[in-house]
Amino acid sequence: MELENLKIPKCKNFNGYKPCISYKNCLENGCQDERDETKLGTKILIIALEALGAVLDYTAILPAVKRKFPISTIYWLTMPSAEKILFNNHLIDKLFVWNDEKRMILRQIEFDFVFNADKSDYACAFANEVKAKNKLGFLLNEDGKIIPANESALYSYRLGLDDQLKFRDNQRNGLDIIHEAFELEYKRDEYTYFFTNEEKEFIENYKKEINYDPSKTYVGFNTGCSNLFPNKKMTIEKHVQLINELAADDRLKILLLGGREDTERNQQIIDSLSREIQSQIINTPSTMGLRRGACFMNIADVVISGDSFGMHMAIALRKYVIAWFGLSCWSEIELYDRGEKLFQKDLECSPCWKRVCPKNLECISMIDLNKIIMITKNYASTNLRILNKV
């Protein structure tokens, strides 16, 4: 066989250094797997690097991508911290983490489409470098300024530059907007997050460990948020007040949820409760990593949370979500008719996306705890709880 006659299979399984199937020679005999799902088809690179909640949020575009390009190969580039969110996602063919080696490889591939979701100079700069017939989302111009790559991304672009539009006028959720930017049909597809078989077994074993009672409604408190925006957190005192009220209802079981950064905070909440209430609380481990945290959250029927990665994970796990908003934009979050959003309509400074509050965090101090209690108890009293467990 001469080099000029070499026919490299357009197959997802072919890598060029070993047979795809033992003792099957694709070079001599052609591709040995002609299924549509193994054909390269349309090659698409999605760039969604950070933050964690946004990366999980953007997984909802994958069904729309597959509808538009049924025979396709989807590559996803993300930060190492977000890799576990996308792990085991069968809609992603090739997952790349942001490092020199992986970016070097991606620069050598000729894509049909690049979808860049991130408005950061480094994500846009890399999107500029990638070889692709079509680039959607965001790029850099010759002055190093972030610009929309296509007409359909213009609304998303303007949203970031116009406070009146973002904080007051916009009523579209973020998924609707990113679908438009990528020229995809928006059909309210769910986030895509998949447990492994080992994780499913872990969940069942943990249920046995905590004597899980399916007749109860399990209420999870996601108590923390990213350290970048600490003012999204409800105070410890408010958490204690809520837990005291809800723990008195024998239909409910309370779980504390959170990551490594929430360990001390959750312990402070526990220590602030009476011994009787403490004995009723399930303080789930917070130091076992993101995917184990999702396993613990999966126990809950209802998740009470601020606008955080934990809220997005609860949405991905199809939980009933009660979310409070202060500095962030409630209109941009899609709860899929499973939950309620609490926010202050008449507070002039909210939302604001400020990291430091000049007004003593009125948006957090005004959270209606009685409404959270009412919503939670109403959920426990209705068929929603039963349907959620099926």
Image (spheres, rainbow, N blue to C red):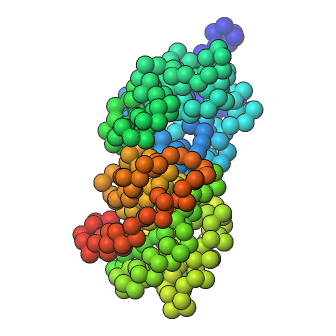
Q: Tell me what residue is drawn at x 62 percent, y 46 percent.
A: 83
Q: Nearer the viewer, residue 200 or 307?
A: 307
Instruction: Determine which quarter of the picture holds residue 226.
Output: bottom right
Instruction: Determine which quarter of the picture holds residue 122.
Output: top right
- Could you tell me residue 206's position as x and y percent? 53, 74
- Could you tell me residue 324's position as x and y percent? 43, 59
| Quarter occupied by the N terminus | top right
Q: Nearer the viewer, residue 371 or 67?
A: 371
Residue 56 in view of the camera: no
In the figure, 378 relative to 111: above or below? Answer: below
Q: Tell me what residue is drawn at x 56 percent, y 72 percent.
A: 236
Q: Tell me what residue is drawn at x 41 percent, y 74 percent.
A: 218
| Quarter occupied by the C terminus | bottom left
- Could you tell me residue 193's position as x and y percent? 48, 51
- Could you tell me residue 17's position as x and y percent? 70, 30
Q: Nearer the viewer, residue 230 or 83?
A: 230
- Outermost residue, left direction? 383
Q: Tell me what residue is drawn at x 30 percent, y 54 percent.
A: 337
**Image-based side of 151 in relation to 139, left or right:** left
How many marks are shown on the rendered structure?
A: 0
In the figure, 231 relative to 101: above or below? Answer: below
- Outermost residue, bottom direction? 276
**Image-based side of 102 in relation to 68, left or right:** right
Q: Nearer the viewer, residue 54 or 113?
A: 54
Residue 165 in view of the camera: yes
